[in-house]
Image (cartoon, helix red, strand yellow):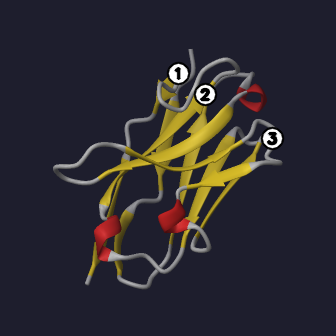
Amino acid sequence: QVQLVESGGGLVQAGGSLRLSCAASGRTFSTYAMGWFRQAPGKEREFVAAISSSGGVTYYTDSVKGRFTISRDNAKNTVYLQMNSLKPEETAVYYCAVRSPGSSWSHPDYWGQGTQVTVSS
């Protein structure tokens, strides 16, 4: 069982920045790939970014490339999402997720409770 707790959400003006954190429980954090998803009101949850277990490989949805950076600190069991140049349409609840080896991002193994990000215009 893995528990995920997100933090760092809030209200920011368009063009601003936020850094989300996701702290994970368990001693096997370094074996999991980690990802961030978001769900805007009335829309389906969508993939934002992911990072391999070692941190050596990262993936981003096209709309955030060059603006968002995912990173992890396995010593702290924490994954981060640095978000720059935020846009109002990126207002959403942001979720952290865990993918174990053999699973896919279409069905992550665990989810956090989410943190609200609101970008004002």
SS at mark 3? loop
Q: Nearer the viewer, mark 3 or mark 1?
A: 1
Q: Amino acid at mark 2?
A: Arg
User: Looking at the image, which is closer to me, 33 or 25?
Assistant: 33
Q: Residue at x 37, y 76 (%)?
A: 87
The crowd level at tag 1 (other Cα within 10 Å; few <14, some 14-19, many 20+) is: some
Q: Position of residue 110 (x, y in %)?
A: 50, 25
Q: Amino acid at mark 1?
A: Asp
Q: Which mark is residue 109?
A: 1
The crowd level at tag 2 (other Cα within 10 Å; few <14, some 14-19, many 20+) is: many
Position of residue 74 relative to residue 20, above or below, is above
> How many labels, in total?
3
User: Looking at the image, which is closer to me, 101 or 82?
Assistant: 101
Kindly indicate the quadrant of the structure image that contains residue 60: bottom right
The crowd level at tag 3 (other Cα within 10 Å; few <14, some 14-19, many 20+) is: few
View extreme (top): residue: 1
Q: Residue at x 38, y 50 (%)?
A: 38
Position of residue 25 relative to residue 121, above or below, is above
Residue 103 relative to residue 15: left or right: right
Q: Quick one: label 3 or label 2, which is nearer the N terminus?
A: 3
Q: Position of residue 56 (x, y in %)?
A: 83, 48
Q: Residue at x 48, y 66 (%)?
A: 63
Q: Position of residue 96 (x, y in %)?
A: 50, 41
Position of residue 113 relative to residue 68, above or below, is above
View extreme (front): residue: 62
Q: Which mark is residue 75?
A: 3
Say which quadrant the C terminus sits in: bottom left
- Which residue carries the number 2 mark? 99
Q: Contact (CB < 8 A) between labels 3 and 2?
A: no
